[in-house]
Amino acid sequence: MDHSSHEMGSGSSGGSASESRFQDIMMSMEKKMMETPMTDNVDKDFASMMIEHHKGAIEMANAYLSAASNGKFSEMANTIVSAQTQEIEQLKAVREDVKTSIKDKAGSKELMNSMDMMPASGSESMNIDQQFATMMIAHHKGAIKMADIELKRGENEKLKKMAQQMKDDQKKEIDQFEDFLK
């Protein structure tokens, strides 16, 4: 089935309603991440920021599913919702268990600086599948940056293991999205 005509609505200028909706979600997520109180503990800060990051992915996946329930990425969107909902609960639990008092102000600042995830605009001519893929690639690249910081500077082994798994999973999804956009 061809889903090239799926749109969340029609944009009169500057892009479609779906592009605007995905961008709004990304901007809202980035704002919430910027407002996350930093503790200067990389493990706690990574967990707190990744929780907001995952909430953004879930919201984008749900917006996509609402607009294109039989779209090219419906199965992947459902997987994103399921997997990242579970990871949010795991992140919350591990964050509460972090006992280390090691302060790493530079590491926490590095996490904050990793958040520029908004892709360049210009997807006006893209269908919903292309828009979703483009936004999720940018979103996942942001998660990989954050995971790399946790792997490099974090102390909690559970979080480091989660960060590596997130990185691996997101790289696979990026590859799928990029293959589709070729």
Image (cartoon, helix red, strand yellow):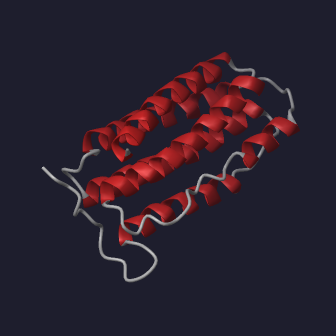
Percent across and percent down for residue 77 are: 33, 43
Q: Seen in the image, is 8 located left or right of residue 122?
A: left
User: Which quarter of the figure is the C terminus placed in?
Assistant: top left
Of residues 59 and 15, which is closer to you in this image?
15
139 versus 166 height, above or below? below
* 95 left or right, relative to 172: right
Q: Nearer the viewer, residue 72 or 179?
A: 179
Q: Residue at x 56, y 46 (%)?
A: 53
Location of residue 82 with respect to 168 vertically, above or below? below
Task: From this view, report whether residue 137 is shown above or below residue 35.
Answer: above
Q: Is residue 147 left or right of residue 21?
A: right
Percent across and percent down for residue 155 are 75, 21
Residue 166 placement (x, y as % from top left): 52, 29
What residue is drawn where x is 38% and y is 36%?
A: 176
Against 56, residue 144 (above or below) is above
User: Number of marks in the image?
Assistant: 0
x and y percentages locating residue 52 in the rendered image: 57, 48
Identify the residue at image location x=49%, y=48%: 55
Q: Residue at x 56, y 60 (%)?
A: 120
**Quarter of image, res 127:** bottom left
Q: Residue furthest front?
A: 182
Q: Nearer the viewer, residue 167 or 120?
A: 120
